[in-house]
Amino acid sequence: MRRSPGAMLAHLADPIVAIATAPGRGAVGIVRASGADLAPLIQAVCARPLRPRVAHYGPLLDAQGEAIDQGLAIHFPAPHSYTGEDVLELQAHGGPVLLQLLLARCLQALPGARLAEPGEFTQRAFLNGKLDLAQAEAVADLIDASTEAAARSASRALCGAFSARVQALADGLVQLRLLVEATLDFPEEEIDFLEQADARGRLQAIAAELDATLAQARQGALLREGLRVVLAGQPNVGKSSLLNALAGAELAIVTAIPGTTRDRVAETIQIEGVPLHVTDTAGLRAAHEAGDEVERIGIERSWQAIGQADAVLFLRDLTRAGEPAYEAADAAIAAQLPAGARVLQVYNKLDAVPTPAPAAAAAALPTRPADAITLSARTGEGLQTLRRALLQAAGWQPGAEGLFIARARHLDALQRTRQHLQQAEAHAARRDAALDLLAEELRLAHESLGEITGQMSADELLGEIFSRFCIGK
């Protein structure tokens, strides 16, 4: 049973043990232990002292002194370990039963030991100063990365690139706070603070650097979260064909029969390293036109998916454009799309438009928006234009270098920091600048930044973050 975040923090003195490799069979499996003193465990399982950070091959023993397996044992004495505590890693063959035997033996041999909670090893690394909070989160992001670009960005964050940017901003705020508060403490000096200390210039420089960091963080968050894209439109407009074309695989059934897709079909693809979670939905039409109850439910689920999407690809059929009933149905769908939704107008089946000039015929359509994308899911013509449009809708900046992974809470903290700096700039711009209000806004901005690296984080927040990690990490 998983403990609450508060309970996790209350049991940090306990020695912990966990299987650190993924469930299932494998060539190698790892059991990891961390605690203040692992000498009893080392003696019980290895029956000999271990040189620090040296792999020792030999039997891993049960309570009767019999070998559970032949494997490697590595001891990382505190504080030179991942958690900052004593750490022991036992590498054995990766059979599930074997690893459970080894886990049970460690729990038996180490007084007071218990199973580790999800993320508890990394939580201890954070609390013992081995990682800051942004780096600790990057560990989980590196494991969960779905694209090469996301993995590289998470690695940069783990190495401290994001934290260094945040720390540089914090250092600038500290220096500015010192100047402001020194002026508050010594008003008799009659120093014209804003002019002589160039407070406004310093504040503007910090705000500009923050804006650059926020822009990079938004790109990093996109790499982590991806974009939820929903294919919508009337039955038989080619949504399933387009999903298959984008994914490069036959994921959805494609037939000429309207209403083939009855439920959502989802696939994650990547474009320039950005993950896109694409969902094919049932064809949209009025509920009374649905062929049966299954199709009606599928249509309801389609609208639910559209409501949750970051971007909607509204597909139309070029071969039916101009038909009054078809155009009216498209207009009815367009009217129901959520207000403010990012909608890409896509005209499909370019290959089926009568020759000799399909592109000219498509261009002549009176109802086609200026920014519409014309393509053929069957032949692939126009797909690259669609891919570029999807990246643009996501806010992705092609060619961005040195990105670091970021989370929604990081963006929130940076945005709140920016809001406080805007208030501070407003106070600093006044002739009768209220230095106490300026000092307060700088303090609040500094606190918001501190939340990113964990310098100013509540225990409940820490517990919630680490509880989402995998067990053994």
Image (cartoon, rainbow, N blue to C red):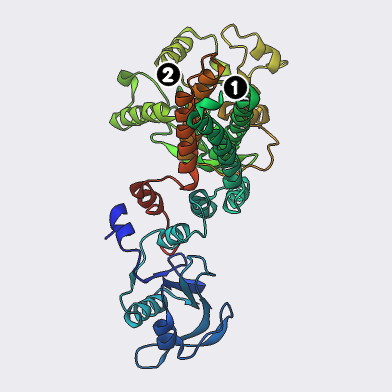
Q: Amino acid at mark 1?
A: Asp
How crowded is the residue under tag 2: few (<14 C-alpha within 10 Å), some, or many (20+)? some
Above or below: residue 165 compared with residue 1:
above
Q: Which mark is residue 192?
A: 1
**Going from the N terminus, do you reach mark 1 or mark 2 first?**
1
Most distant residue in the front direction: 188
**Left or right: 191 with respect to 20?**
right
Position of the N terminus by quadrant: bottom left
For the residue carrying disc 1, how many other residues have a C-alpha within 10 Å: few (<14), some (14-19), or many (20+)? few
Q: Residue furthest right?
A: 356
Q: Residue at x 47, y 21 (%)?
A: 341
| The label number, if any, that marks residue 271 in the structure image | none
Q: Position of residue 375 (x, y in %)?
A: 63, 24
Where disc 1 sits, the SS reads loop
Which residue type does callout 2 highlight? Leu
Q: Quadrant of the C terminus?
A: bottom left
- Using the numbered discs, state the Cα–Cα distance from disc 1 to disc 2 in whole angstroms: 57 Å
Between 143 and 205, the residue placed more toward the observer is: 205
Could you tell whether 173 is left or right of 2 in the image? right
Residue nearest the observer in this picture, 266 or 348: 266
**Residue 24 at x, y percent in the picture:** 44, 67
Residue drawn at 51 percent across, 81 percent down? 73
Q: Identify the mark at residue 337; answer none if there is no mark.
A: 2
Looking at the rendered structure, the secondary structure element under dot 2 is loop
